[in-house]
Image (spheres, rainbow, N blue to C red):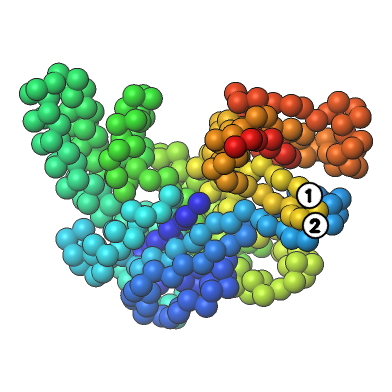
């Protein structure tokens, strides 16, 4: 999973990126501090791996990973080349989902590119630039579909769909806020619209907001209202706080979060939101050589899940020996679970579930 961190200049993108990746991206109080996108790979927190490690004492533990891309700040007119313009937009095309950082705190020492704090306005600035870029793409695609429809009437449905999407965008609304049938989703999947990408709004707040004052922040509620209209996710985060705890040990981090009334870090909440937004789950493999988590899309069948490990596993798939993580832990060992008949033999039509611990049998 690749998540692109975007936002106006000076909203806390690079601070957040540094905090969640410890990558040391440059962070400063002036616009366009980030020009080339910084990339950092982050392990997905998964307590199930720790539990399996105690059981198997593996030589290696390999978590699932997420790639975060810190993309340059965007300004009005980017779709027409202002600021870093097309470079910014092309970087967004390469990610699976957008993490839009929105500034929701006052601080006179940190310059805001628009001169004041206004989450609704800031979100509209970026969404409109994505929409303007999409309208250019749609114009070309509509022309192509109209020409194709002259020779084949099946393209008339596509022309109708694209014109509806165009009209929606011209109202200043993102494509992600539209509802599509399965057939229409198949057509849209072939059109790289930026405003159709899944989005997580990160409300970057002050540390004080997390001391029981989250709901009293009016800027946060502005973000919630916009996200509700788009069926998008919102994750409240204090980027500075995340930066403070990024170097702490696991124990110190948990103690610190508990002191301020949080059960988990902003990174953990952001990753969970990303998994939920993109419909992702993890299955697990376990043995002495390695305990590992593998990320797949919800609804993936066993052979395709096996193909994540190696293409030979999918090509020569025979069966999957599966047990739920909970059943395995409850019985203390795979041998004990087998005695109780809890290890199932599943075939090619089995749909993988989150937390399945699996051994694939294959023959090539």
Q: How many marks?
A: 2
Q: Residue at x 43, y 49 (%)?
A: 96
Q: Residue at x 40, y 54 (%)?
A: 95
Q: Is residue 353 visible?
A: no
Percent x, y of residue 248? 71, 73
Q: Earlier in the sequence, mark 2 or mark 1?
A: 2
Q: Residue at x 50, y 42 (%)?
A: 278
* In-front residue for pair 7/90: 90
- Residue 256 in which image quadrant: bottom right
Report the side of 157 relative to 224 (left or right): left
Label ID, residue 357: none
- Say whether marks 2 and 1 touch (CB < 8 Å): yes
- Residue 210 in which image quadrant: bottom right
Percent x, y of residue 276? 56, 42
Q: What SS does tag 2 mark?
A: loop
Report the side of 143 relative to 295 (left or right): left
Name the residue tied to disc 2: 58
Where 16 falls versus 140 (above or below)? below
Q: Residue at x 29, y 45 (%)?
A: 193
Report the side of 109 relative to 237 (left or right): left
- Residue 165 in which image quadrant: top left
Q: Is residue 114 visible?
A: yes
Label ID, residue 287: 1
Q: What SS does tag 1 mark?
A: loop
């Amino acid at each position: 999973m690749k998540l692109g961190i975007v936002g106006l200049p000076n909203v806390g993108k690079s601070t957040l990126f540094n905090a969640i990746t410890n990558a040391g991206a440059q962070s400063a109080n002036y616009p366009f501090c980030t020009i080339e996108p910084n990339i950092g790979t982050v392990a997905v927190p998964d307590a199930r791996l720790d539990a399996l490690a105690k059981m198997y004492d593996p030589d290696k533990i390999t978590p699932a990973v997420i790639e975060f891309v810190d993309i340059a700040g965007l300004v009005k007119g980017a779709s027409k080349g202002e600021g870093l313009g097309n470079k910014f937009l092309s970087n967004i095309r390469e990610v699976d989902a957008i993490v839009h950082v929105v500034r929701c705190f006052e601080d006179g020492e940190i310059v805001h590119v628009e001169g004041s704090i206004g989450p609704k306005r800031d979100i509209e600035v970026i969404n409109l630039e994505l929409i303007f870029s999409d309208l250019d793409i749609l114009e070309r695609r509509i022309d192509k579909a109209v020409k194709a429809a002259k020779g084949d009437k099946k393209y008339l449905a596509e022309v109708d769909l694209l014109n509806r999407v165009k009209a929606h965008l011209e109202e200043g609304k993102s494509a992600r806020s539209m509802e599509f049938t399965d057939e229409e989703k198949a057509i849209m999947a072939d059109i790289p619209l930026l405003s159709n990408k899944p989005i997580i709004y990160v409300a970057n707040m002050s540390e004080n907001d997390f001391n029981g004052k989250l709901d009293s922040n009016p800027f946060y509620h502005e973000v919630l209202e916009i996200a509700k209209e788009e069926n998008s996710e919102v994750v409240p985060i204090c980027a500075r706080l995340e930066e403070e705890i990024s170097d702490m040990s696991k124990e110190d981090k948990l103690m610190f979060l508990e002191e301020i009334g949080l059960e988990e870090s902003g990174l953990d909440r952001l990753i969970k939101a990303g998994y939920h937004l993109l419909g992702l789950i993890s299955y697990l493999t376990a043995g002495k050589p390695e305990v590992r988590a593998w990320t797949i899309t919800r609804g993936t069948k066993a052979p395709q899940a096996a193909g994540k490990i190696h293409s030979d596993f999918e090509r020569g798939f025979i069966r999957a020996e599966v047990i739920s993580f909970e059943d395995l832990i409850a019985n203390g060992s795979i041998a004990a679970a087998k005695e109780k008949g809890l290890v199932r033999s599943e075939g090619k039509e089995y749909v993988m579930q989150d937390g399945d611990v699996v051994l694939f049998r294959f023959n090539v």
